[in-house]
Amino acid sequence: MNVCRFALALTFVFSGTVKLIDPRGFQYKLEDYAGALGLSALLPMSLPLVLAVVVAMAEFIIGINLFFGIRRRLTSVASLVFMLVVTPLTLYVALTGAVADCGCFGDALVLGNWQTFWKNVILLAASVVAVCRPREMTRFISERNQWTISIYSVAFSLALALYCVYRLPVIDFRPYHVGVDLPRAIEEEWTGNAAEPKYADFSIDTPDGDDITISWLEQAGYKFLLVAPYLETADDGAVDDINNIHEYCVKEGYPFLCLTSSAADAIERWQDMTGAEYDFAFTDGTVLKTVIRSNPGLLLLNGGVIVKKWPNSALPDASSLTAPIEELKAGEPQHGGYLRGSLLLLLWFFVPLLVFALADRVWAGGKYLKSLRKQSINQQTNVGT
């Protein structure tokens, strides 16, 4: 019983966590599902993102509750209902190939569609066992203090999702992460030396149709890349900052290029609306959504190496751009990587969770010893009488 419960708990926590880290990535996957099912026209624009956050939070909280044995019957039923929804859906995807991959573990772990389906069959069976025998789950937190873990899990998961929507994922599992040398990685794929293709669809094409991917990326020194997958839906709230950054680049001699998948008429509308004077080039929209989870978003490169990423909501302002980029805080390499992001998650969630659990065990142990002492005193009193 507990083997099934822990298998479910760890899978739900991992799946929920990677979706909370990258809610927009899961949003794009839900939009793919809606398109495959012919529902795209029926969904309000903001609904996929809301659903992405809600589903990720639900997975995470179900997993935490299963692990600690919180509300065992209700949590078991919730896990079964969840699996009854996603298992037929992944069977449909596996049979039709309507979506390239299910996205159940985001970009952290990509499974084939049939692998995903059989994984869900196993988890469905485990959830049936959990529903049938919930009282056999060992509790790791007393009933009196369960609310502490539940409320903290809800608050943390919501805060993490909102932060990663407003800013950028705290862990970047995608190929275009900070530190990658793009021209080198692309050329390795072209020469067949890469383990798996990750950059096959990345290209930079001029309006005249010329491919300048490698030549532009291999320019020495710093350069700025504005990424706007779809200008028609791009957030124009920071256009002044973008124009100021472009002016800074002109002054300091840094190349500045905007990548988009939008057509020429959309570019003209954007220029008329924002006063943009920078050059545009074309790249596949899906690729650009993978490069950065912001529309638009900004990349700083040194040579072909990605040094830093900024979302539309946190672009450097003009007052901070007063010297060559290498002398500014804005030009400092961005701290990132799996290790740092994982340590942050441990520090802000799992360490406090462990403290809560240990405090609860100390409280429960003290209460148990107190009851034993009271029982011993009662026995001595009965013997004396």
Image: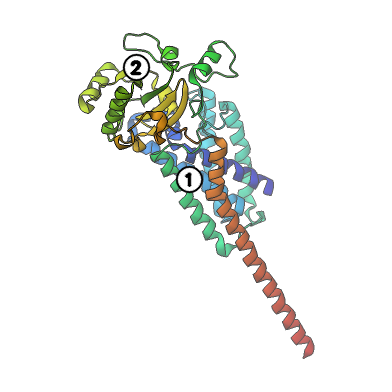
Q: Position of residue 56 (x, y in %)?
A: 48, 42
| Amino acid at pointer 2 | Ala
Q: Is residue 11 above or below residue 356?
A: above
Q: How many marks?
A: 2
Between 248 and 281, the residue placed more toward the observer is 248
Q: Which residue is mark 1?
A: 57
Q: Is residue 112 above or below residue 124?
A: above
Left or right: 240 in relation to 212: left
Q: Position of residue 115 (x, y in %)?
A: 60, 28
Left or right: 351 in relation to 330: right
> Can I make out residue 328 in this image?
yes
Q: Position of residue 18 (x, y in %)?
A: 52, 38
Residue placed farthest to the left in the image? 272
Q: Which residue is mark 2?
A: 281
| Amino acid at pointer 1 | Met
Q: Secondary structure at mark 1?
A: helix
Q: Is residue 145 above or below residue 382?
A: above
